Image (tube, helix red, strand yellow):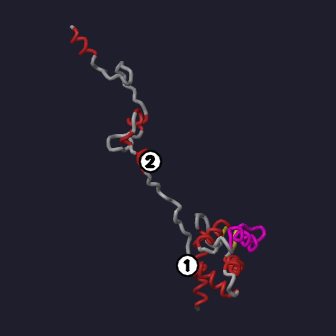
C-alpha cells in the first residue's frame, strides 16, 4: 500500500514537470529540458556526484533511439540509474528509496524567474514628472500617458508656427502702438 502511494506521488511529480512550460503537453512524456529541471529542482544534481552532464547522459541512455521524450517507465529507469551515483554510500535499494523521496510530490519551482527590479535608477528613469522637452508633452500631470494625443502633433490652421508663444496677440500689439 505504501509503495503504491509513493508511485502515485512519483507519477504526480512526473506529470507536473512534463507539462511545465508546454501548453500542448499531455503530461505522459517528459522532454530533456524538463528532465534536467526536475533533477535540478529536486536536488538530484548536487554538483559533485551528479552533474548536469550525468543527467543528460542518463536521459539519452533510457529514451528510445528516435524519441526526444521519455515515458514514466523510462523515467523510473533513469532514477534507478542516477540513485547509486547520487547516494554512493547506500545500498541500491536504499539509494533508490532516497532518490524517490527527493522527487515525491515536488513540482517545478519558479523562484527567481520573474524578479521585479526596484532600483533607485529605475524609479528615476520612469518618473514622468521629471521628463523634459517633448517627452513631457506625452504625459498629463498625474503621470498617465496621453496616448495618441501625446504622440502626434495636431495641426492648427491659425497662421502661426507650432511653438509660437504669442499666438493671437497681434491685434493687441498693433493697437497698443497706435
Residue neighbourhood size for the residue with mark 2, other residues' Cα within 10 Å, grouped as few (<14), some (14–19), many (≥20): few
Element at label 1: loop
State the quadrant of the N terminus: bottom right
Along the horizontal axis of the image, is 116 left or right of 22? left
Callouts 1 and 2 close, C-beta under 8 Å: no
> Per the image, is 83 magenta?
no
Label number found at residue 121: 2
Q: Nearer the viewer, residue 55 or 105?
A: 55
Query: In the rendered image, is residue 95 in sight?
Result: yes
Element at label 2: helix
Magenta segment: 50-68
Which residue is drawn at the image coordinates 21% and 7% (left, top)? 178
Along the horizontal axis of the image, is 172 left or right of 104? left
Residue 57 sits in quarter: bottom right
Which residue is drawn at the image coordinates 39% and 35% (left, top)? 132
Label number found at residue 105: 1
Mark count = 2
Along the horizontal axis of the image, is 21 left or right of 64? left
Name the spot of residue 104 as percent of width and height, x first: 58, 80
Amino acid at each position: 500500500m505504501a509503495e503504491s502511494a509513493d508511485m502515485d506521488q512519483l507519477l504526480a511529480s512526473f506529470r507536473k514537470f512534463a507539462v511545465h512550460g508546454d501548453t500542448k503537453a499531455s503530461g505522459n512524456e517528459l522532454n530533456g529540458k524538463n528532465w534536467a529541471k526536475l533533477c535540478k529542482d529536486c536536488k538530484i544534481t548536487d554538483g559533485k556526484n551528479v552533474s548536469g552532464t550525468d543527467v543528460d547522459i542518463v536521459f539519452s541512455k533510457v529514451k528510445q533511439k528516435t524519441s526526444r521524450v521519455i515515458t514514466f517507465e523510462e523515467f523510473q529507469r533513469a532514477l534507478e540509474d542516477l540513485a547509486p551515483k547520487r547516494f554512493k554510500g547506500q545500498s541500491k535499494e536504499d539509494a533508490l528509496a532516497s532518490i524517490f523521496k527527493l522527487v515525491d510530490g515536488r513540482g517545478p519551482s519558479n523562484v527567481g524567474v520573474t524578479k521585479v527590479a526596484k532600483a533607485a535608477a529605475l524609479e528615476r528613469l520612469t518618473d514622468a514628472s521629471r521628463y523634459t522637452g517633448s517627452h513631457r508633452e506625452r504625459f498629463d500631470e498625474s503621470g498617465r500617458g496621453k496616448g495618441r494625443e501625446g504622440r502626434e502633433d495636431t495641426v492648427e490652421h491659425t497662421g502661426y508656427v507650432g511653438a509660437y508663444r504669442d499666438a493671437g496677440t497681434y491685434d493687441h500689439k498693433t493697437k497698443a502702438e497706435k
